[in-house]
Image: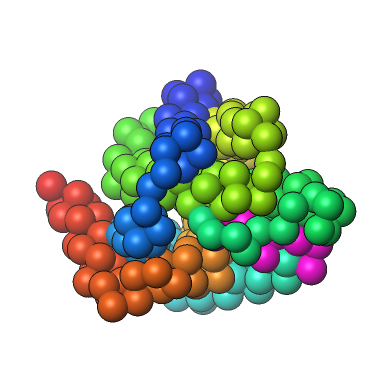
């Protein structure tokens, strides 16, 4: 249980590392976009070769497909609501994020959106420790690598929107802590679960992550690196694929 919390906290801490870079350093928009594309590829590979593949091995096609589709629907529905409250561009590094004066409540919506993006990843990290086996190193590495550009891009956008350092670093510190808690809860809640249920929940997280990539990460990557986004995304995909076969 505590090992799961530690791994989840480690992966979540990358958000804070990225936020520090994004808020304190003037990183060129093209670099942010390229790194975001790389992170997108890493997560795509982890979902395809780790989460969905594992879910299929556990429960077969029906729980896997059903879980992934449900995860995508639930994430998209929540994301649509949060977008209407001001969190549509929470991972954008330019001036797209609204300030609190432009849209009241947008700060809260952005915070909830950031939690929405990170929880499925952390739950899967915790679930990977069920049965006494080692943590899925590929999943932890993929989440860590992808979290850095997420935090970087989002914090840069928050700075553009005029949000304070206390808000930015308080938010990402809290989300890193929640990531550890979510991993611990995933480990405890899913221990002893029927393989079909575990498959469905793992696939649910995979579907939610894929929807998140398409809704929030790829648009930022394409915004300023559209001529290179395909190449850097494939580079990230192959990096994670290589990690899964070492």
Give the image location of residue 200, x and y in percent: 55, 62
| In the depicted structure, whether residue 181 falls above or below residue 138 | above
Give the image location of residue 44, x and y in percent: 36, 65
Give 62 or 210, whichever is nearer the viewer.
210
Q: Is residue 51 magenta?
A: no
- The structure residue drawn at horizontal position 76% and vertical position 61%, both measured from the top left corner, is 86
- The structure residue drawn at horizontal position 26% and vertical position 73%, both measured from the top left corner, is 228
Give the image location of residue 207, x and y in percent: 52, 67
**Residue that lies at the very extreme toward the right in this rendered image:** 104
Give 50 or 75, whichever is nearer the viewer.
75
| In the depicted structure, whether residue 73 falls above or below residue 185 | below
Decide if residue 43 is on the left or right side of residue 104: left
Give the image location of residue 121, x and y in percent: 50, 49
Residue 74 visible, this orientation: no
| In the depicted structure, whether residue 221 falls above or below residue 108 | below
Residue 50 position by quadrant = bottom left
Give 132 or 165, whichever is nearer the viewer.
165
Q: Is residue 91 magenta?
A: yes
Decide if residue 180 is on the left or right side of residue 241: right
- The structure residue drawn at horizontal position 55% and vertical position 33%, both measured from the top left corner, is 176
Decide if residue 186 is on the left or right side of residue 25: right
Q: Which residues are magenta?
A: 84-92
- The structure residue drawn at horizontal position 58% and vertical position 75%, both measured from the top left corner, is 69
Residue 172 visible, this orientation: yes
């Amino acid at each position: 249980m505590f090992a799961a919390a530690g791994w989840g906290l480690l992966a979540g801490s990358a958000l804070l590392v990225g936020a520090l870079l994004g808020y304190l350093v003037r990183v060129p928009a093209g670099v942010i976009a390229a790194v975001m594309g790389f992170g997108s590829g890493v997560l795509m590979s982890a979902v395809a070769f780790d989460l969905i593949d594992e879910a299929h091995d556990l429960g077969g096609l029906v729980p896997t497909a059903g879980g992934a589709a449900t995860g995508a629907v639930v994430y998209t529905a929540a994301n649509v609501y949060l977008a209407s409250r001001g969190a549509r561009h929470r991972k954008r590094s330019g001036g797209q994020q609204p300030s609190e004066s432009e849209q009241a409540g947008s700060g809260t919506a952005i915070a909830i959106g950031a939690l929405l993006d990170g929880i499925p990843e952390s739950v899967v990290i915790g679930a990977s420790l069920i049965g006494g086996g080692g943590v899925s190193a590929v999943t932890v590495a993929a989440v860590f690598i992808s979290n850095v550009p997420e935090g970087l891009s989002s914090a840069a956008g928050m700075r553009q929107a005029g949000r304070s350092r206390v808000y930015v670093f308080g938010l990402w510190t809290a989300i890193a802590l929640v990531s550890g808690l979510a991993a611990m809860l995933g480990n405890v809640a899913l221990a002893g679960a029927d393989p079909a249920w575990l498959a469905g929940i793992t696939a649910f997280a995979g579907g939610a992550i894929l929807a998140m990539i398409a809704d929030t990460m790829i648009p930022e990557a394409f915004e300023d690196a559209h001529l290179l986004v395909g190449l850097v995304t494939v580079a990230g995909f192959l990096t994670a694929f290589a990690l899964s076969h070492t």
